[in-house]
Amino acid sequence: MDKAEAKLLLGRELNAFAALSYSELAGKIGRIEVKTLAGESGAVYQIEIDVLRDDRPDGNLLILASIDDGGWHAFLPLTESRIKRTDGTLI
């Protein structure tokens, strides 16, 4: 897996997801989003994004994302996360 390429794709997808409103993200809790993307190198990657409540029912939302190429990296994918506050700002 080309880690630089994978990190670029993961960051792009995570940032697009994190740009959603708080209420849109809250509606995605419990539904893991899965995408398959091809990098410029031709490698195929799978990205999974999940939204969880951070600490309390009306609290911050934790957005978790991971990427792998289906090889042994599937057991240890690259991950990134963002936290969306109730006012819509990102931490």
Image: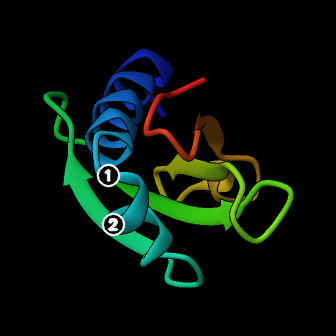
Asked whether the beta carbons under mark 1 and mark 2 sit within 8 Å of each other, the answer is: yes
Q: Which colour scheme is used?
A: rainbow
Q: Which of 62 and 7 is in front in this view?
A: 62
* The C terminus, quarter of image: top right
* Rendering coords of residue 24 (x, y %): 33, 66
* Rendering coords of residue 54 (x, y %): 78, 54
- The local secondary structure at tag 1 comes to loop
* Rendering coords of residue 13 (x, y %): 30, 42
Vertical placement of residue 90 versus 23, above or below: above
Mark 2 Cα within 10 Å, few/some/many (few <14, many 20+)? few
Residue at point 39% right, 40% down?
14
Q: Mark 2 points at which residue?
A: 24
Q: How far apart are marks 1 and 2 (CA)?
A: 5 Å
Vertical placement of residue 40 versus 68, above or below: above
Is residue 25 found left or right of 76 in the rendered image?
left
The disc at residue 21 is 1
* Rendering coords of residue 28 (x, y %): 44, 76
Q: What residue type is labelled 2?
A: Glu
Q: What residue type is labelled 1?
A: Ser
Residue at point 38% right, 42% down?
18
Residue at point 22% right, 53% down?
37
